[in-house]
Image (cartoon, rainbow, N blue to C red):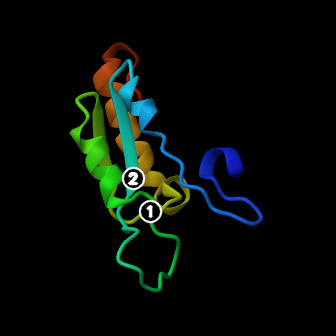
Amino acid sequence: VWNIFGIGPDTVEARDHAWVLDGLPAPSLAIVGGAPLNPPRPFPGMPSLISDATLARLGAHPLVTVETIAEAGHNVARDANGPLHRLVGGWWNAAFPEAAIVL
């Protein structure tokens, strides 16, 4: 938790992982949940943990395509398994038509 998120027993230290985007070598798909992190409010489930600033940075990157699954929070695979598989399957089929999967 400390190395990735900067959360320790006595302190919280901001982590910046922007360097990953700076060195991105290939087109990438970022899938996020549609339940936004902000503004602070009660949630029936966990919201997406991506900030507006990070989402904007992803969206501005020339090699990143951002897809939002509206009914999901942070755990997209748990919250929206079917839509996630259809989305990823559609991208797979477009990239590899000779190995297309049935959706």
| Up/down of 89 relative to 80, above or below | above
Q: Position of residue 25 (x, y in %)?
A: 38, 18
Instruction: Give the number of the disc on residue 9.
Output: none
- Residue 103 shows up from this direction: no
> Which residue is at 55% across, 59% downward?
78
Between marks 2 and 1, how big is the CA–CA gap? 7 Å
> Which residue is at 39% across, 53% downward?
32
Extreme-top residue of the structure: 98
Instruction: Give the number of the disc on residue 48.
Output: 1
> Which residue is at 42% across, 38% downward?
18
Extreme-bottom residue of the structure: 42
Kind of residue sitting beneath label 1 = Ser
Q: Which quarter of the rendering shows the C terminus? A: top left
**Residue position for label 2:** 32
Kind of residue sitting beneath label 2 = Val
Between 102 and 2, the one lying in front of the other is 2
> Which residue is at 47% across, 86% downward?
42
CB-based contact (under 8 Å), mark 2 and mark 1: yes
- Tag 2 secondary structure: strand
Quarter of image, res 3: top right
Would you call the spot at circle 2 few (<14 residues within 10 Å), some (14-19), or many (20 or more)? Answer: many
Between 24 and 27, the one lying in front of the other is 24
- Tag 1 secondary structure: loop
Q: Position of residue 86 (x, y in %)?
A: 38, 44
2 or 1: tag closer to the N-terminus: 2
Q: Position of residue 66 (x, y in %)?
A: 30, 44
